[in-house]
Amino acid sequence: MATRNKFDVDENLESPFDIRHFRRAMVYIRKQQKPMLLAFALSALSAGIALTAPLIMQHVIDVTIPNQNASGLVGWSLLMLATILISVILATIRSRIMTRVGQEIIFEIRTDLFKHLQELPFQYYDDRPQGKILIRVVNYVNSVSDVLSNGIINFILEIVNLIFIAIFMFAVNVQLSLVILAGLPVFLGVMLLIKTRQRRAWQAVSNKSSNLNAYLQESISGIRVTQIFTREQHNEGIFTRLSGNFRKEWMRAVYLNNLVPFSVDNLSTIVTTSIYLVGLLALSPGTVTFGVILAMSSYAARFWQPILNLSNLYNSFINAVAYLERIFETLDEPVTVSDVTDAKELPPIQGGVTFDNVTFAYDPGTNILENLSFEVEPGESIALVGPTGAGKTTVVNLISRFYNVTDGQIRIDGHDISQVSLRSLRSQMGIMLQDSFIFSGTILDNIRYGKLDATEEEIIAAAKTVCADEFIREFPDGYLTEVNERGSKLSQGQRQLISFARTLLADPRILILDEATSSIDAKTERLLQQGLNELLKGRTSFIIAHRLSTVKNCDRIMYVWNKGIAESGSHNELMAQQGLYHRLYSAQKMEV
């Protein structure tokens, strides 16, 4: 599973496309069936009116001109002009309707995708580059919208056109109509030969496009590191390789697509030539007039035009299939961390936490924690220390149920957290992660993110508690200062303090601090600690820290090691044991 989270690894489809995907797509189409039916009616009417033009032309050539009927010629010309104008007007109205329909379908699919992505667990994002997720929501949805809107109507319309044209053709001349139809078996043979290769080619394009987008997103996010280590030329080489792979697959897919119009154009030319040869040489001059030949050549062009359009629609459909597969694969991604069917609301908690023989593995067979058991009393402050990768962050992630335990049970105030709703669980927790994410917007909005109904006074009070108020007021716009995504114009310490204020504003009963003070200077940390000491009173807290001086005053310190808790006790108790914690603390003290 770990290899999936790379920009240069092609994604394997977990559910190949079949008719069920198309049925699912029809769910979005049915919501727009009324405007689509209107658009189809307008299209059919426009096409029917346009098909009268060859008949008018035949009548003019065979009757009006030989009879030297000047007034009739003007009348028939005006009628033909009217048919063209009406056809164009109806087609324009239809185009506007279908543009709106296409955008509505885009909106529905993209909304469903985003909603589902909001509910997917951390594990899903651990296994995939962000760029490969973004391209599905933006590019792929755009690519399929026209096929699901205009494509459906155009497909039906072109079939109807073919039937109408065939009726008009056979009404004019049966023998020449059979000449026109003779090219169909050849065309169908070409389609059967290339259809499988086309689908595989567009799947390859989808993969290479996803890889390219993933690397582009990764490169933009890590541009500072790139420039620090002067990796520009090396990265350009990677991008050139990925872009070249995309270009190669795109050209291959387009080459296969172009075989279809190439075949249609040549068959149309051969058929039109055959009409003149058969009409002038093989058939009786008394039954085939020059007007009939011109009318049939016009119908031949019109007959093969829908076939060309259908082949282009087929190409678009093959292209869209590759993207629909990715879209529905994302929508089918299971929400493994979700409310059970009869989930209960977790009542207001005191903060007691119990781990009962908990085992957990990110990947099957590789346990991070095994048979972990401990109890935390309400209001107790717990420090989790130990070497990197021992599982400290995993412990607090399990308390918040960002992952499901592999085995065992976690209870809060006696309630099994797997049986309560996620909203009622997480709304009573405050989690301050090591990576302080700042959203684009004002500082005020960022702090309010965890409690949307918070007043400005409450926000300022939270900022003062974590010592953020002073530096915020130094900005020209104070709390209304606009910050960029990820807070690029703020120092890392400032981002952490803003995130701290956001967490504390939610007034949690259980507070989780994961390296929350790692980017704060010693002076600010001392001031912050004063406010935290007051805030932590009466709340259960879990504090992860590598700097052991910051957790000396915790009620209990747990040394996480070897898939469990190796030592547990107060600072003085653990120092007296002369064990793992003593060695770690002594080593840090010597470094200072």
Image (cartoon, rainbow, N blue to C red):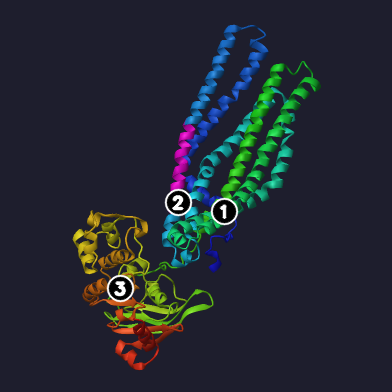
Tell me: residue 387, above or below residue 332.
below
Which residue matches tag 3?
A: 511
Question: Callout 1: 10 Å neighbours few (<14), some, many (20+)?
Answer: few
Q: Is residue 46 left or right of residue 389?
A: right
Task: Name the residue at the right extreme.
Answer: 282
Nearer the observer: mark 1 or 3; the answer is: 1
State the residue in front, 27 or 474. 474
Q: Give the spatial CA distance, label 2 vs label 3.
A: 35 Å
State the residue in front, 587 or 367. 587
**In magenta segment, residue 519:** no
State the residue in front, 586 or 197. 586
Secondary structure mainly formed by the magenta segment: helix
Of the image marks 2 and 3, the number of the one nearer the N terminus: 2
Q: Give the spatial CA distance, label 1 vs label 3.
A: 47 Å
Which residue matches tag 1?
A: 240
> Can you give x and y, in whole percent of width and height, for residue 26 in the image?
52, 48
Q: Start and end of the magenta stretch?
A: 93-112
